[in-house]
Amino acid sequence: MCNKITYNPAKATCCGGQNITEGLSENMSKCCGLKAYNPINEICCKSNLHAKISANTTCCDKDPFEEDMHLCCGTENNQKRMTRLSSDHRCCIGRGLKGQYNRKLECCCEKEYPLVQFKVAEGKCCVKNISSPSSQSTDGKSKADLGYFENPKEGNLGTNETKCTNGNRVETYFEQDGFECCGHYYYNTSLWSCCNKRLIPRNKHGWSFIFAGSNICV
């Protein structure tokens, strides 16, 4: 029973004892607030559910986070996700401001304005100190430069059931565009490949590593 309603845990999930999510068994799901989700393809960040950007997606506060695409700046309870401008960029935090800087060309000046300054002769840093930050954006970069990454859209959730099997184990899911079975898992083909009923993460170029002509997956 879930909120006094009978349901089949092999085909649905009860979250918080209040809400039933159909098409996802309790064996294969987790709860994000009162909504069940498939952790292979989605991630819950502070009760906000997102489609994963890749198999390695983690959280930065309420947003999905990819280390090679984003920076997650700030303390644990005050984090902000930024689009990483290059592999050389790092977080720069000071005087209540959050930004990023190129560690090869710039300095992070936590106690000065502007927050991010170019290195000068002999590698000296933070030689400027403007009394007011009004001439600078609040994070040391333009808002356009720090535009947020748009999350990929989830596949359309249908009402037809599909069954994924692995030996005697059978899991039932609602069909979704771009999803396939891998053993008893139901996965997003843009995030994973399936080899010998094992899920292999795709890299940022969409590739997986499986030796051709063999049953070896890496």
Image (cartoon, helix red, strand yellow):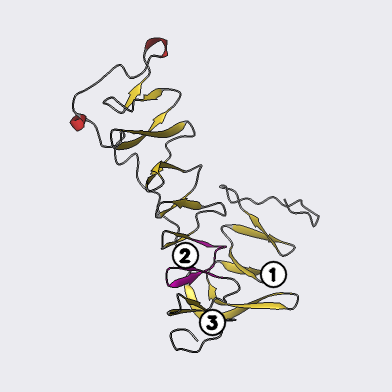
Q: Which disc is residue 160 wearing?
A: 3
Q: Which disc is residue 202 wearing?
A: none
Q: Position of residue 138 (x, y in %)?
A: 26, 37
| Of the two numbered discs 1 and 2 in the rendering, the one whose residue sits closer to the viewer | 1
**Magenta residues?**
29-43
Q: Determine crowd level at label 2: few under 14, some 14-19, many 20+ residues with C-alpha closer than 10 A.
A: some
Left or right: residue 214 compared with residue 185: right
SS assignment at label 1: loop
Chain-order first, disc 3 or disc 2: 2
Q: Is residue 61 above or below residue 111?
A: below
Q: Amino acid at mark 2?
A: Glu
Residue 30 magenta-drawn?
yes
Q: Residue at x 45, y 23 (%)?
A: 104
Q: Determine crowd level at label 3: few under 14, some 14-19, many 20+ residues with C-alpha closer than 10 A.
A: few
- Name the residue beneath numbered marker 1: 183
Q: Nearer the viewer, residue 78 or 38?
A: 78
Q: Disc 1 to disc 2, how far (Cα)?
A: 21 Å
Taking the view exactly as shown, the residue that stands out farthest to the right is: 214
Q: Nearer the viewer, residue 140 or 6?
A: 6
Chain-order first, disc 1 or disc 3: 3
Determine whether label 1 and label 3 are within 8 Å by CB: no
- Name the residue beneath numbered marker 2: 154
Q: Is residue 58 above or below residue 27?
A: above
Q: Amino acid at mark 1?
A: Gly
Q: Amino acid at mark 3?
A: Asn
Q: Residue at x 42, y 72 (%)?
A: 34
| Of the two numbered discs 1 and 3 in the rendering, the one whose residue sits closer to the viewer | 1
Q: Disc 3 to disc 2, how far (Cα)?
A: 17 Å
